[in-house]
Amino acid sequence: MAELQMLDPNEHAVSGRYRLWWRFSRNASAVAGSVIILSVVILAVFAPWLTPHPKDAGMVVDFLHRHQPPSAEHWFGTDKVGRDIFSRTVFGLRISLLLVVGVLGISVPSGAVLGLCAGYFGGWTERIIGGLTNIMLAMPPLVMALAISNLLEPNLFNAMLSITILWWTWHARLVYNVSKSIATEDYVEAARLSGAGPAHILFREILPNCVPVISVKTTLDAAFVILFGATLSFLGFGVQPPTPDLGTMVADARQYLPEYWWEVVCPGAAILYVTLGFNLLGDGLRDMFDVGS
Protein backbone atom coordinates (compact mmCIF):
# COMPACT_ATOMS: atom_id res chain seq x y z
CA MET A 1 0.00 0.00 0.00
CA ALA A 2 1.37 3.41 -0.96
CA GLU A 3 2.09 5.72 1.92
CA LEU A 4 -0.20 8.68 2.24
CA GLN A 5 1.62 11.96 2.30
CA MET A 6 0.26 14.28 4.99
CA LEU A 7 0.28 17.97 4.18
CA ASP A 8 0.73 20.66 6.76
CA PRO A 9 -2.63 22.52 7.02
CA ASN A 10 -0.75 25.77 7.56
CA GLU A 11 1.46 25.32 4.50
CA HIS A 12 -0.92 27.14 2.17
CA ALA A 13 -1.32 30.06 4.58
CA VAL A 14 2.44 30.33 5.04
CA SER A 15 3.08 30.30 1.31
CA GLY A 16 0.37 32.94 0.83
CA ARG A 17 1.94 35.21 3.42
CA TYR A 18 5.36 34.66 1.82
CA ARG A 19 4.03 35.74 -1.58
CA LEU A 20 2.58 38.88 -0.05
CA TRP A 21 5.85 39.68 1.71
CA TRP A 22 7.80 39.00 -1.49
CA ARG A 23 5.67 41.49 -3.39
CA PHE A 24 6.03 44.08 -0.65
CA SER A 25 9.80 43.67 -0.21
CA ARG A 26 10.40 44.00 -3.97
CA ASN A 27 8.57 47.36 -4.05
CA ALA A 28 11.14 50.10 -3.49
CA SER A 29 8.58 52.76 -2.63
CA ALA A 30 6.92 50.48 -0.07
CA VAL A 31 10.21 49.77 1.66
CA ALA A 32 11.07 53.47 1.63
CA GLY A 33 7.67 54.32 3.09
CA SER A 34 8.10 51.71 5.82
CA VAL A 35 11.50 53.13 6.76
CA ILE A 36 10.08 56.67 6.89
CA ILE A 37 7.13 55.67 9.08
CA LEU A 38 9.36 53.58 11.35
CA SER A 39 11.74 56.52 11.81
CA VAL A 40 8.83 58.85 12.62
CA VAL A 41 7.39 56.40 15.16
CA ILE A 42 10.77 55.98 16.86
CA LEU A 43 11.29 59.74 17.03
CA ALA A 44 7.79 60.33 18.36
CA VAL A 45 7.88 57.60 21.00
CA PHE A 46 11.36 58.45 22.28
CA ALA A 47 11.13 62.21 21.74
CA PRO A 48 12.13 63.16 25.33
CA TRP A 49 15.37 61.20 24.96
CA LEU A 50 16.22 61.78 21.28
CA THR A 51 15.73 65.55 21.10
CA PRO A 52 18.58 67.88 22.16
CA HIS A 53 16.28 70.34 23.95
CA PRO A 54 13.16 68.47 25.14
CA LYS A 55 12.21 71.24 27.57
CA ASP A 56 11.59 73.51 24.55
CA ALA A 57 8.42 71.54 23.85
CA GLY A 58 6.82 73.40 26.76
CA MET A 59 6.53 76.99 27.92
CA VAL A 60 10.16 78.08 27.54
CA VAL A 61 11.39 81.54 26.61
CA ASP A 62 15.00 82.37 25.66
CA PHE A 63 15.03 85.72 23.87
CA LEU A 64 18.83 85.77 23.76
CA HIS A 65 18.76 82.93 21.20
CA ARG A 66 15.67 83.86 19.17
CA HIS A 67 15.61 83.52 15.37
CA GLN A 68 18.92 81.68 15.18
CA PRO A 69 19.60 79.89 11.87
CA PRO A 70 20.24 76.13 11.66
CA SER A 71 23.52 75.16 13.34
CA ALA A 72 25.24 72.26 15.07
CA GLU A 73 23.46 73.13 18.32
CA HIS A 74 20.06 73.89 16.79
CA TRP A 75 19.65 71.71 13.70
CA PHE A 76 16.46 73.48 12.55
CA GLY A 77 17.29 76.85 14.13
CA THR A 78 15.23 78.56 16.82
CA ASP A 79 11.85 80.30 16.77
CA LYS A 80 10.64 83.75 17.80
CA VAL A 81 11.12 83.06 21.53
CA GLY A 82 14.37 81.09 21.25
CA ARG A 83 13.00 77.54 21.35
CA ASP A 84 14.73 74.74 19.44
CA ILE A 85 12.67 74.06 16.32
CA PHE A 86 13.97 70.51 15.80
CA SER A 87 12.88 69.46 19.29
CA ARG A 88 9.47 71.04 18.82
CA THR A 89 9.12 69.45 15.39
CA VAL A 90 9.77 65.96 16.80
CA PHE A 91 7.20 66.52 19.54
CA GLY A 92 4.86 67.84 16.86
CA LEU A 93 5.22 64.53 15.01
CA ARG A 94 4.03 62.85 18.20
CA ILE A 95 0.86 64.98 18.12
CA SER A 96 0.32 64.10 14.45
CA LEU A 97 0.59 60.37 15.13
CA LEU A 98 -1.76 60.65 18.10
CA LEU A 99 -4.24 62.35 15.79
CA VAL A 100 -3.94 59.53 13.26
CA VAL A 101 -4.39 56.81 15.90
CA GLY A 102 -7.34 58.57 17.51
CA VAL A 103 -9.22 59.40 14.30
CA LEU A 104 -8.63 56.20 12.35
CA GLY A 105 -8.92 54.04 15.46
CA ILE A 106 -12.55 55.14 15.74
CA SER A 107 -13.63 55.92 12.18
CA VAL A 108 -12.24 52.78 10.49
CA PRO A 109 -13.93 50.17 12.74
CA SER A 110 -17.22 52.09 12.90
CA GLY A 111 -17.29 52.74 9.16
CA ALA A 112 -16.37 49.13 8.39
CA VAL A 113 -19.14 47.72 10.61
CA LEU A 114 -21.74 50.03 9.09
CA GLY A 115 -20.56 49.18 5.58
CA LEU A 116 -20.70 45.44 6.33
CA CYS A 117 -24.23 45.69 7.69
CA ALA A 118 -25.46 47.76 4.74
CA GLY A 119 -23.89 45.43 2.18
CA TYR A 120 -25.03 42.18 3.77
CA PHE A 121 -28.51 42.92 5.10
CA GLY A 122 -29.68 45.31 2.38
CA GLY A 123 -33.25 46.60 2.58
CA TRP A 124 -33.94 49.28 5.16
CA THR A 125 -30.51 48.84 6.72
CA GLU A 126 -28.89 49.66 3.40
CA ARG A 127 -31.20 52.65 2.79
CA ILE A 128 -30.66 54.19 6.24
CA ILE A 129 -26.89 53.74 6.34
CA GLY A 130 -26.51 54.68 2.68
CA GLY A 131 -28.64 57.81 3.11
CA LEU A 132 -26.71 58.93 6.19
CA THR A 133 -23.42 58.31 4.39
CA ASN A 134 -24.52 60.33 1.35
CA ILE A 135 -25.61 63.24 3.55
CA MET A 136 -22.27 63.31 5.36
CA LEU A 137 -20.32 63.00 2.11
CA ALA A 138 -22.22 65.94 0.64
CA MET A 139 -20.82 68.27 3.31
CA PRO A 140 -17.48 69.97 2.53
CA PRO A 141 -15.09 68.26 4.98
CA LEU A 142 -12.99 71.30 5.88
CA VAL A 143 -16.02 73.57 6.31
CA MET A 144 -17.73 70.98 8.51
CA ALA A 145 -14.61 70.48 10.62
CA LEU A 146 -14.15 74.23 11.03
CA ALA A 147 -17.76 74.63 12.10
CA ILE A 148 -17.47 71.88 14.72
CA SER A 149 -14.13 73.19 15.97
CA ASN A 150 -15.53 76.70 16.19
CA LEU A 151 -18.36 75.51 18.44
CA LEU A 152 -15.99 73.65 20.76
CA GLU A 153 -12.83 74.66 22.59
CA PRO A 154 -9.83 74.32 20.24
CA ASN A 155 -7.68 71.43 21.49
CA LEU A 156 -6.39 68.04 20.36
CA PHE A 157 -9.46 66.09 21.51
CA ASN A 158 -11.93 68.36 19.72
CA ALA A 159 -9.76 68.36 16.60
CA MET A 160 -9.90 64.56 16.63
CA LEU A 161 -13.66 64.65 17.17
CA SER A 162 -14.30 67.05 14.29
CA ILE A 163 -12.30 64.90 11.88
CA THR A 164 -13.73 61.58 13.11
CA ILE A 165 -17.33 62.75 12.59
CA LEU A 166 -16.55 63.02 8.87
CA TRP A 167 -14.02 60.28 8.25
CA TRP A 168 -16.09 57.12 8.92
CA THR A 169 -18.17 57.77 5.81
CA TRP A 170 -15.35 56.96 3.37
CA HIS A 171 -14.73 53.58 4.97
CA ALA A 172 -18.44 52.80 5.19
CA ARG A 173 -18.84 53.46 1.46
CA LEU A 174 -15.73 51.42 0.58
CA VAL A 175 -16.64 48.38 2.70
CA TYR A 176 -20.25 48.54 1.52
CA ASN A 177 -19.18 48.24 -2.13
CA VAL A 178 -16.93 45.27 -1.38
CA SER A 179 -19.30 43.44 0.97
CA LYS A 180 -22.23 43.93 -1.39
CA SER A 181 -20.47 41.88 -4.05
CA ILE A 182 -19.08 39.30 -1.61
CA ALA A 183 -22.48 38.67 0.03
CA THR A 184 -23.65 36.79 -3.07
CA GLU A 185 -20.65 34.44 -3.23
CA ASP A 186 -21.20 30.68 -2.90
CA TYR A 187 -19.15 30.28 0.29
CA VAL A 188 -21.26 32.93 2.04
CA GLU A 189 -24.43 31.15 0.99
CA ALA A 190 -22.95 27.84 2.15
CA ALA A 191 -22.18 29.33 5.56
CA ARG A 192 -25.74 30.62 5.80
CA LEU A 193 -27.25 27.25 4.87
CA SER A 194 -25.04 25.50 7.41
CA GLY A 195 -26.65 27.55 10.18
CA ALA A 196 -24.02 30.27 10.67
CA GLY A 197 -25.42 33.43 12.23
CA PRO A 198 -25.11 36.95 10.81
CA ALA A 199 -22.22 37.84 13.13
CA HIS A 200 -20.22 34.81 11.95
CA ILE A 201 -20.89 35.57 8.30
CA LEU A 202 -20.06 39.27 8.66
CA PHE A 203 -16.85 38.96 10.67
CA ARG A 204 -15.54 35.51 9.68
CA GLU A 205 -16.57 35.21 6.03
CA ILE A 206 -16.96 38.71 4.57
CA LEU A 207 -14.66 40.94 6.66
CA PRO A 208 -11.41 39.00 5.96
CA ASN A 209 -11.96 39.64 2.26
CA CYS A 210 -12.31 43.36 2.95
CA VAL A 211 -9.03 43.60 4.88
CA PRO A 212 -6.82 44.36 1.84
CA VAL A 213 -8.83 47.39 0.70
CA ILE A 214 -9.31 48.59 4.29
CA SER A 215 -5.56 48.36 4.92
CA VAL A 216 -4.68 50.35 1.81
CA LYS A 217 -7.36 52.97 2.47
CA THR A 218 -6.35 53.36 6.12
CA THR A 219 -2.68 53.87 5.29
CA LEU A 220 -3.43 56.49 2.65
CA ASP A 221 -5.95 58.16 4.97
CA ALA A 222 -3.28 58.58 7.65
CA ALA A 223 -1.52 61.12 5.42
CA PHE A 224 -4.77 63.02 4.82
CA VAL A 225 -5.59 63.07 8.54
CA ILE A 226 -2.21 64.62 9.29
CA LEU A 227 -2.72 67.27 6.60
CA PHE A 228 -6.27 67.89 7.82
CA GLY A 229 -5.13 68.28 11.41
CA ALA A 230 -2.28 70.58 10.39
CA THR A 231 -4.76 72.70 8.43
CA LEU A 232 -7.05 73.07 11.44
CA SER A 233 -4.09 74.05 13.63
CA PHE A 234 -2.82 76.48 10.99
CA LEU A 235 -6.21 78.21 11.00
CA GLY A 236 -6.26 78.31 14.81
CA PHE A 237 -8.88 75.59 15.40
CA GLY A 238 -6.59 72.70 16.31
CA VAL A 239 -3.87 72.17 18.89
CA GLN A 240 -3.14 75.37 20.77
CA PRO A 241 0.23 76.79 21.93
CA PRO A 242 2.44 76.13 23.75
CA THR A 243 1.83 72.49 22.73
CA PRO A 244 4.06 71.91 19.68
CA ASP A 245 2.05 71.18 16.54
CA LEU A 246 3.39 71.31 13.00
CA GLY A 247 0.48 73.34 11.63
CA THR A 248 0.63 75.83 14.49
CA MET A 249 4.40 76.21 14.08
CA VAL A 250 4.02 77.06 10.41
CA ALA A 251 1.23 79.53 11.17
CA ASP A 252 3.24 81.31 13.88
CA ALA A 253 6.36 81.59 11.73
CA ARG A 254 4.84 82.69 8.41
CA GLN A 255 4.98 86.36 9.42
CA TYR A 256 8.78 86.15 9.52
CA LEU A 257 9.18 85.02 5.92
CA PRO A 258 11.45 85.23 4.02
CA GLU A 259 14.12 86.42 6.47
CA TYR A 260 13.70 83.53 8.92
CA TRP A 261 12.66 80.95 6.35
CA TRP A 262 13.75 77.92 8.41
CA GLU A 263 10.97 78.52 10.94
CA VAL A 264 8.41 77.64 8.24
CA VAL A 265 10.39 75.31 5.98
CA CYS A 266 11.53 72.85 8.66
CA PRO A 267 8.09 72.08 10.19
CA GLY A 268 6.63 72.07 6.68
CA ALA A 269 9.28 69.59 5.56
CA ALA A 270 8.35 67.38 8.52
CA ILE A 271 4.72 67.35 7.33
CA LEU A 272 5.92 66.45 3.83
CA TYR A 273 8.18 63.70 5.23
CA VAL A 274 5.53 61.88 7.24
CA THR A 275 2.77 62.20 4.62
CA LEU A 276 5.14 60.97 1.92
CA GLY A 277 5.92 57.93 4.07
CA PHE A 278 2.26 56.99 4.49
CA ASN A 279 1.56 57.47 0.78
CA LEU A 280 4.52 55.31 -0.26
CA LEU A 281 3.49 52.64 2.25
CA GLY A 282 -0.09 52.72 0.98
CA ASP A 283 1.07 52.23 -2.62
CA GLY A 284 3.19 49.30 -1.47
CA LEU A 285 0.26 47.66 0.30
CA ARG A 286 -1.88 48.15 -2.79
CA ASP A 287 0.71 46.32 -4.90
CA MET A 288 1.15 43.63 -2.25
CA PHE A 289 -2.56 42.85 -2.06
CA ASP A 290 -2.98 43.52 -5.80
CA VAL A 291 -5.85 45.90 -5.06
CA GLY A 292 -7.09 47.69 -8.17
CA SER A 293 -7.21 51.48 -8.26
Image: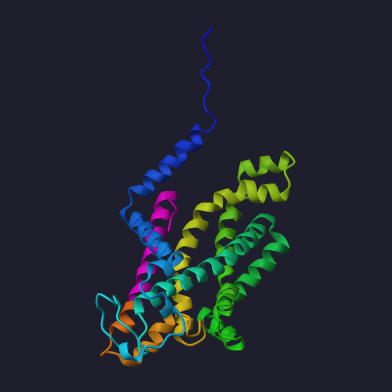
Q: Position of residue 38 (x, y in %)?
A: 40, 59
Q: Residue at x 28, y 88 (%)?
A: 260
| Left or right: residue 75 compared with residue 95 | left
Q: Position of residue 253 (x, y in %)?
A: 36, 88
Confirm whether the magenta stretch covers residue 243: no
Q: Position of residue 29 (x, y in %)?
A: 33, 57
| Left or right: residue 196 compared with residue 187 | right
Vertical side of 255 occupied by 149: above or below: above
Main SS category, magenta section: helix
The picture quadrant where one finds residue 261 is: bottom left
Vertical side of 184 occupied by 49: above or below: below
- Quadrant location, the N terminus: top right
Using the rendered image of the protein, determine whether residue 268 is visible from the camera's viewpoint.
Answer: no
- Quadrant location, the C terminus: bottom left
The picture quadrant where one finds residue 52 is: bottom left
The picture quadrant where one finds residue 172 is: bottom right
Q: Residue at x 47, y 76 (%)?
A: 228
Q: Residue at x 57, y 84 (%)?
A: 149
Vertical side of 284 occupied by 79: above or below: below
Q: Position of residue 74 (x, y in %)?
A: 29, 78
The front one of 44 and 278 is 44
| Left or right: residue 19 compared with residue 120 | left
Start-end of magenta stretch? 267-293
The front one of 37 and 50 is 50
The front one of 113 and 129 is 113
